[in-house]
Amino acid sequence: MKGVVAAPQVEAVEAGRRMLLAGGNAVDAAVATAFAQGVVDPQMNSLGGWGVAQVYHAASGQHLCIDFHGWAPLKATPDMFAARVKRKLRFDLWEVEGWANQLGYLSVVCPGNLRGYHEVHRRFGKLPWAAVLDPAIELAEVGFEVPGELADLWQRPPLQEGQPSMRDILTATPAAAKLFTKNGRPYEAGELFRNPDYANTLREVAKNGPEVFYTGWIGERIAEDFARNGGLLTAEDLREYRMRVGEPVRSSYRGYQLTGNPPPCSCVQVMEVLKILEGFDVKDMGFGTADYWHVMALAQKASFVDRARYLGDPEFQPVPVDLLLSDENASGWREKIIRNVRFAVPGVQVGEPAHTTTVSAMDAEGNAVAITHTLSTPASGVVVEGLGFMFNNAMQAFYPYPGHPNSIAPGKARATGIAPTFVFKDGAPYLVASAPGATKILTGVLQAIVHVLDFGMTPAEAVSAPRVHCEGEQVDLEARAYYAVKDAMAKKGHKVVKSLYSFDPFFALVHMVARDPATGRLTGAADPRGRGGLALVDR
């Protein structure tokens, strides 16, 4: 097997497959997939978004986290939305007058995706830079039939009262309405969607690299448009934007080594839950039993207590990673769980909104990569005329008042639920798991890992098995859990809400790739809760 790629979009996975067939490695495949995702899922990702990557390069032994978080514009202030707050919404979002933090030019943080993709490829790719953009350019130019899931998204009402609908987003700016609607009507399933403007933008990037975006004519056009429309993003923001490149956070679980991206990502929280679970014999409890899900739910909830206390941008405040991953911390939480001590999640937890996407990949050379990137929830509606892509709206996930760990500050990255996680066995990559899906990203990723390591599931079984999610007083349980389990958990004191769907996208879309430690055989799986794609390429 030459390589494996898993991602939520079939068309984007095909781009990665083309790279492997052309002699590229997992990095080429992942970056090509990432670019294609911006074409075929344009409210999940684009050049106007941000994200993170984790890469293990077998030949050199390098293992890096390349984090390209969006940062608040340099003109942003901690109180810029404070006087306009109307109310707090679910998922720790906030309604501001005129949806100013959710819709339009003030909602945009400085995008990092292009810098990130280029850095990942520059360091570890094999194929020419232009080659990894070819599939995305072709998709944008020729077009693709709108899949049912994307058509459903474009017709979606507000996620909750106090948020804009997708129609509001698609028509927020004249350029957005022109690109994504036909006389104000979103495209329907099966209709051909073409985006020649984005094809031209990507051609410029293929020819000139990221500088055309950050310091060249594309950046100038972006800055001019934002200035005309009251936005804060400037040419200086684009020119001064910097990624964060460094070592991953490391932990262990039952003899396996874990690695993840550092804060403000949530990989540390994944590891903290696993550290708590390590003291329980979950295999003996039995998968899907009330005892198992009771312990899993409380371990998750415990981690959200610490998340609320500590998680933020480490360049603006200390995040005590060693404390969170310590045996003492895990032991303390285990004692509370065993004694069924009640505890509450304090303050505000900030989760990555659901409009995110991901790609996981491995190859025969031993390389492993995950890229998780986003436009936030689900995008700002801002399209600069002629560029063909929508910008993020990540400002809405900052705390709108000063003095909080996640308050707005110039150049600051917001906390995120993004959590691509690697599992190593005997020093070599064994599993790569990543997902979109709000704070359910981290609970989905950690449960998929438990499914493999504790219950011996295959990747396909691991991402498909029913899940539980708990980040506060409510425990969300997928519909395939037995009603007797729900009743038993209620008797243990849980407020259980059972999903109406057997395979509910609410619980995140985990995409996993794996290497058999004994045979070296590659495999993988796309979460059936979405329409994900998987490519396995023979030598």
Image (tube, helix red, strand yellow):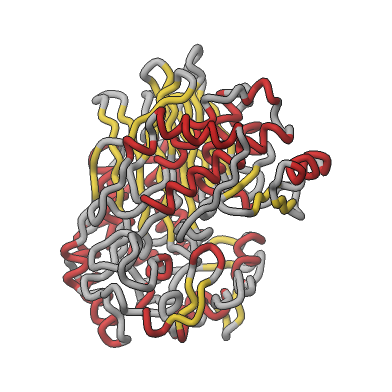
Query: Which residue is found at the position 38% from the left and 73% from the top?
Result: 400
Residue nearest the observer in this picture, 271 or 225:
271
Q: Is residue 24 left or right of residue 244?
A: right
Measuring from the top left, give residue 270's x and y in whole percent. Answer: 47, 39
Residue nearest the observer in this picture, 65 or 92:
92
Q: Is residue 470 left or right of residue 404?
A: right
Residue nearest the observer in this picture, 95 or 36:
95
Measuring from the top left, give residue 52's x and y in whole percent. Answer: 35, 48
Query: Which residue is found at the position 61% from the left and 66% from the top?
Result: 153
Measuring from the top left, give residue 539's x and y in whole percent. Answer: 46, 24
Q: Is residue 239 left or right of residue 272?
A: left
Position of 358 relative to 169 (above/below): above
Residue 175 visible (yes or no): no
Measuring from the top left, give residue 317's x and y in whole percent. Answer: 26, 54
Query: Which residue is found at the position 61% from the left and 47% from the top?
Result: 469
What is the total number of numbered labels drawn onto the structure image? 0
